[in-house]
Image (cartoon, grey):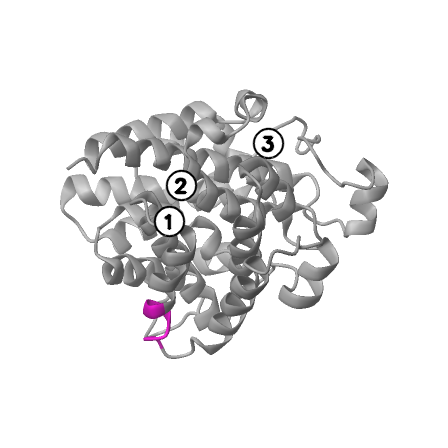
């Protein structure tokens, strides 16, 4: 992995965490409530959430555990889907779940033991101990809990199909509906391609070609295509347009589509993150995914310094990126 790609990886994960932190303060608010709190432009900066500014949510927590699992798999030469599954068991431990064997170091970060509105589907699936596969789904959930954590899978390989398949497999651990795990596959390929320097519109075409190979792709494909149509049309997406055309982002295909739309329409990274969080829906997840895309494209230098300075666990993210640089180099 060349230095430019690592710089973009750092940008992808940090911008994803910033988008998560921006959206975390308004995740459950409708746009009229957001405007009444912050003015006609909506949220324009961090607002208090979980007792501080710049607080991450479960989206970033699980993204970090995804990367830790992938790092251990590469170092050990073991199955990445298995290592990610074990990493999610460690995340569950931070949320009050059962004891697990010592492995990795994220379990020792006290702040990661805070509960930040963890997704019910993720908790239920992990607590069951009977995690799913694409061929043997654990449930019929298509919540966005699979796609929100998938960006690190982009690092696993330069092979598009391998990345898509692994992201879908890690998504299916907890989310059994195709729109739940296929959105994860699309996101991981988008990040992979953008990290490699492919323009976002061309990266979407690559991911789309992989998506259509899968059974049950039609729902995700329809919203992805609609997001692209809106995003390249030159009209700024309003919160009302986002809601009426793409939904609230609570499910995988919607969250991915909102992230793609706002990334395509963004004037710059900061503008894209604010577009992605100011709507009546799952603002932290859509902000995180948009950040993953724009951070991969623009690098860490495009993330406003004031947001990085106040970001919770920035040092933890940076440490994981440093580890990824050493582990996935070449």
Q: Are marks 3 and 2 in contact (CB under 8 Å)?
A: no
Q: Which residues are magenta?
A: 209-214
Residue 137 image position (x, y, % from top left): 39, 72
Seen in the picture, residue 18 relative to 153 is either above or below; the reply is above
Image quadrant for the N terminus? Answer: top left
Verify whether residue 213 appears in magenta. yes
Question: Rounded to the nearest whole Å, what is the CA distance between mark 1 and mark 2?
Answer: 6 Å
Residue 116 got which mark? none
Q: Earlier in the sequence, mark 3 or mark 1?
A: 3
Mark 1 highlights which residue?
A: 191
- As measured in the structure, the alpha-carbon distance from the residue carrying label 3 to the one carrying label 2 is 21 Å
- Residue 45 image offset from top left, x and y in percent: 68, 31
- Dot 3, how many residues are within 10 Å of its Cα: few (below 14), some (14-19), or many (20+)? many
Q: Are marks 1 and 2 in contact (CB under 8 Å)?
A: yes
Which percent across, then down, holds residue 81? 28, 55
Of the two numbered discs 3 and 2 on the same chain, state the one appearing first in sequence.
Answer: 3
**Displayed quadrant of residue 247:** bottom right
Q: Residue at x 39, y 48 (%)?
A: 151
Identity of the residue drawn at 64% across and 46% down: 275
Query: What residue sits 71% from the left and 66% below the top?
Result: 244
Q: Which residue is mark 2?
A: 296
Q: Which residue is outermost to the right?
A: 36
Left or right of 56: which side holds 279? right
Residue 129 seen: no
Secondary structure of the residue carrying numbered label 2: helix
Q: Nearer the viewer, residue 298 or 35?
A: 298
Classed neighbour count for the residue bearing mark 1: other residues with Cα under 10 Å, few (<14), some (14–19), many (≥20): many
Lateral position of residue 8 relative to residue 220, left or right: left
The residue that mark 3 highlights is 55
Q: Earlier in the sequence, mark 1 or mark 2?
A: 1
Near-viewer residue (239 or 25): 239
Q: Secondary structure at mark 3?
A: loop
């Amino acid at each position: 992995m060349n230095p430019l790609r690592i710089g973009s990886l750092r940008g992808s994960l940090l911008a994803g965490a910033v988008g998560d932190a921006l959206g975390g303060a308004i995740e459950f608010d409708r746009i009229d409530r957001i405007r009444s709190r912050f003015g006609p432009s909506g949220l324009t900066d961090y607002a208090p959430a979980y007792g501080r500014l710049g607080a991450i949510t479960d989206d970033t927590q699980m993204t970090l555990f995804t990367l830790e699992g992938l790092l251990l798999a590469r170092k050990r030469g073991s199955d990445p889907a298995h290592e990610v599954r074990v990493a999610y068991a460690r995340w569950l431990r931070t949320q009050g779940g059962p004891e697990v064997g010592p492995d990795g170091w994220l379990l020792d970060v006290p702040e990661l033991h805070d509960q930040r509105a963890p997704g019910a589907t993720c908790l239920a699936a992990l607590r069951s101990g009977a995690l799913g596969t694409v061929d043997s789904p654990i449930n019929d959930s298509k919540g966005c809990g699979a796609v929100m954590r998938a960006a690190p899978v982009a690092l696993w390989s330069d092979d598009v199909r391998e990345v898509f398949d692994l992201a879908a497999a890690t998504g299916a651990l907890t989310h059994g509906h195709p729109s739940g795990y296929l959105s994860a596959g699309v996101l991981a390929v988008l990040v992979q391609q953008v990290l490699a320097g492919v323009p976002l519109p061309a990266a979407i075409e690559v991911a789309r070609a992989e998506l259509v190979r899968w059974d049950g792709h039609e729902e995700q494909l329809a919203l992805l295509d609609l997001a692209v149509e809106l995003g390249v049309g030159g009209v700024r997406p309003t919160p009302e347009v986002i809601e009426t055309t793409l939904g609230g982002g609570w499910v995988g295909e919607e969250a991915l589509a909102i992230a793609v739309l706002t990334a395509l329409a963004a004037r710059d990274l900061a503008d894209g993150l604010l577009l992605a969080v100011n709507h009546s829906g799952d603002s932290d997840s859509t902000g995180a995914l948009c950040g993953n895309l724009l951070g991969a494209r623009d690098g860490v230098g495009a993330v406003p310094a004031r947001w990085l300075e106040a970001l919770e666990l920035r040092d933890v993210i940076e440490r994981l990126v440093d580890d990824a640089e050493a582990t996935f180099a070449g």
